Image: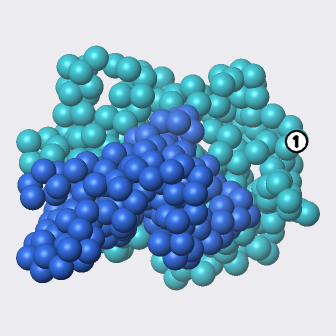
Chain colours: A blue, B cyan
Amino acid sequence: MIALTLAHLGIVASALAVALAIALPLGIVAARRTRGSALLLGTLGAIYTIPSLALLALLVQAFGLGVAPLFIALVAYAQFMLVRNIVAGLRGVDAGTLDAGRGLGMTARELLVRVELPLALPAIVGGIRIAAVAMVALATLGGYVGAGGLGSLIFNGLALHHDRDIVAGSLAVCALAIAIEISLRTLERRLTPH
Amino acid sequence: MNHGASITFAGVRSRYPGSEIDAVGGVDLTVDAGSFITFVGPSGCGKTTLLRTVNRLAPITGGRIEIDGIDTATLDPVAMRRSIGYAIQAIGLFPHMSVGENVAVVPTLARWTRSEISSRVDEMLELVRLDPARYRNRRPSQLSGGEAQRVGVARALAARPRTLLMDEPFGALDAIVRRELQAELKQIVASVGTTTLFVTHDVGESLRLADRIVVLKDGTIEQSGTPLEILAHPRTPFVRELFAEDPAVARLRDAARTNA
């Protein structure tokens, strides 16, 4: 049970890390381009609206059963939530603050690292929180495609009519989602200046 | 003592990309080293843009600006900005940094050593009359408007700039705090000898602070001169009206006429 929970968390955490590594540069570039960001967010939003089971089925066709299709689905789904919040966070930085940074002689890079990203951090963590919770739920489908995690407990339970497994798996998924929600929300509050 | 820079504007024009008109349309002005100059005029007169051409936050699309005889177009804008102090309204403080970190921004960018930065921060906070022990670790959100603006001044002067640019720095403050800070600012810049360019729409403020006032209208200089000259001999009806708005100013002007 603990092993399954850890496996579940492991898939979500590694997919989240990869998703963030993609979303951060995308978001930074998109924040500076009005038209480009509309196009990007439109595309990511379209991916986001594909029903998760359908997307997973398509990915299984392409990559076979196992962790790979689930991992790709998680990364793809997270993009919309992550990029949207990164763009919103960066655009929300006060114009006067940016002007002061430029006027004091920061390069574009120094401004990004020292001012824009730290001030956008609460919004970015907010995106990570929403994405992580959605990914915990989505990763349950991993049980369906042989990716392991708590989903396998639930789906096996359903197949074999082991009610206890179903309940235990479901409760564990809920607990994981709630724990992530609470801890990231706390972090988000801590990071907000005041 | 006088370590301020001399600044020459020669036919300076500034037009923002995509705009049909010059925000600044041909300004000639010589600023003596160590003097305090105010740019005054109504909204849209080009005073802020003119200030921003000095550190090239606004583009120079015609003419040139020389600082100590060096055409600024030949300098790297980032390095040049670090050598020029810059202060705007209180919102310009970085909310995620402590007071000490804010003051240390330019020395940090310029890679001063930790101990140099630390002693400079204390020195600057003392200069603007904020007790370093009490204020260093505070956040901007824990400051009053007047305190925040003092920090802005300390930050602008931290790296010993020879030129200081200020854009309505006291605009958001109430009248009493404003007066207090004006007097202190005048004293501080005189003690460090920095050449100061100060934008304001408040004619009273410009009279209290300036060695020379530059009145701007539609992107060009309407009149420039000492406060007394401008009060006693407004060259155009526009200047006369601008300085007549305030009854206190009108009294001052009458006094200036009698003395002149």
Residue A93 placement (x, y as % from top left)? 47, 60
Residue that label 1 marks: B62
Residue A180 placement (x, y as % from top left)? 20, 63
Is B227 positioned to the left or the right of A156 in the image?
right
**Quarter of the view holding residue A58:** bottom right
**Quarter of the view holding residue B246:** bottom right
- Residue B186 can be seen, yes or no: no
State which quarter of the image contains the C terminus of chain B: bottom right
Q: Nearer the viewer, residue B119 or B238?
A: B119
Q: Residue at x 62, y 78 (%)?
A: B244
Is B249 positioned to the left or the right of A181 in the image?
right
Q: Residue at x 52, y 76 (%)?
A: A51
Q: Residue at x 84, y 47 (%)?
A: B13
Where B80 falls versus A93 (above or below)? above
State which quarter of the image contains the N terminus of chain B: top left
**What is the chain identity of the residue bearing mark 1?**
B
Residue A151 placement (x, y as % from top left)? 27, 65
Where B224 falls versus B202 (above or below)? above
Q: Residue at x 35, y 56 (%)?
A: A146
